[in-house]
Image (tube, grey):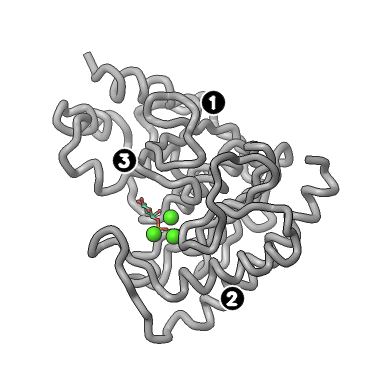
Amino acid sequence: MDKEKRDKLFDQAKDWVLEAGKNIREKINDPLQIDTKSNPNDLVTAMDKETEEFFANHIKQKYPGHSILSEEGFGDELDSLGGIVWIIDPIDGTMNFVHQKRNFAISVAIYEEGVGEIGLIYDVMADNMYQAKRGEGAYKNDVLLSQMDRNKQFEEAVFGLNHFWLCENRLVEEKRMQQFVKDIRGTRTYGSAALEFAFVAEGVMDGYLSMNLAPWDVAAGIVLVNETGGVTTNIDGTELNMLDKDSVLTCNPAIQDRLLNSYIKHGRK
Ligand code: IPD
Ligand code: CA
Ligand code: CA
Ligand code: CA
């Protein structure tokens, strides 16, 4: 995508994200209409749907040739990332939206032929816009985010993890995760994959590891993390499947190799 086209799309996408965020803030104390999806803890609200519909309507009207990949059903059924695709999570961290009224984000990415060109993650209540265009660095509001420290020590890493790592799975049963969290400095759980990616790009965390994320959880975050020198793969260390759910490791490259090889793949000697 040429720069002029990317700049224009970026400005438009950002305007819509800000408008959608303002709408959510204005209604944050209104009574919520909450439904559940795959299980009683998998929440969706009328605001998730309203926000996604807002994006879908605007995009379809202004850019009829673009496709939409999104969570709540207003997007398209895609079997490839060909052309220009908007990958949207209208509210990432719905549980936080419902229970905390903060720590949730709007995540919007624009990919062309499978390449992430634009990433926007808007922390709605904090009014922080994490934003990146491919090849032009990542910003938190107007501040350019630093490149990751290539000499980061594994023992000083702070990692985003979620409750999955307290549940039964191979990496827990084989005590690999327990060893990992003992060997690094600390862990954090924010409950919004998009915000956790943004924090990795910002350098306030050195990585984030999660099972079972959808493309809209990670698409904008990948663009941000790329721009600050980070790397994103699944837990096998291979390229993410951007059309389906996948495990995700996004981190400072100084951490990646040891985490994949000494804990996830083989366990620590
Ligand atoms: C969820 C959040 C959460 C992650 C879940 C996601 P949603 O997205 O990103 O942090 O652990 O796997 O599904 O449903 O709130 O958009
Ligand atoms: Ca959801
Ligand atoms: Ca999500
Ligand atoms: Ca969501």
Q: Amino acid at mark 3?
A: Gly
Q: How many marks?
A: 3
Q: Report the front residue among 59 and 229.
A: 59
Residue 223, given in percent of the width and then of the height, sits at 60, 42
Residue bearing mark 2: 22
Image position of 148 with respect to 41: above or below: above
* Residue drawn where x is 39% and y is 34% of the image: 157
Q: Amino acid at mark 1?
A: Arg
> Mark 2, mark 1: which one is toward the viewer?
2
Q: Earlier in the sequence, mark 3 or mark 2?
A: 2
Image position of 122 with respect to 265: above or below: below
Q: Is residue 44 left or right of residue 119?
A: left
Q: Is residue 255 left or right of residue 26?
A: left
Residue 198, given in percent of the width and then of the height, sits at 52, 49
Distance from label 3 to label 2 (Cα)?
A: 34 Å
Q: Report the front residue among 25 and 182.
A: 25
Given contact means CB atoms under 8 Å apart, are the residues at marks 3 and 2 in contact? Answer: no
| Image-quadrant location for residue 210 | top left
Q: Earlier in the sequence, mark 3 or mark 1?
A: 1
| Image-quadrant location for residue 64 | bottom right
Q: Report the front residue among 167 and 50.
A: 50
Q: Earlier in the sequence, mark 2 or mark 1?
A: 2
Residues packed near mark 3 inside 10 Å, few (<14), some (14 to 19) or many (20 plus): some
Q: Cβ(mark 2) to ligand 4 < 8 Å?
A: no
Residue 254, given in percent of the width and then of the height, sits at 48, 24
* Residue drawn where x is 82% and y is 49% of the image: 5
Image disc number at residue 263:
none
* Residue drawn where x is 43% and y is 26% of the image: 255
Q: Is residue 31 visible?
A: yes
Residue bearing mark 3: 186
Residue bearing mark 1: 150
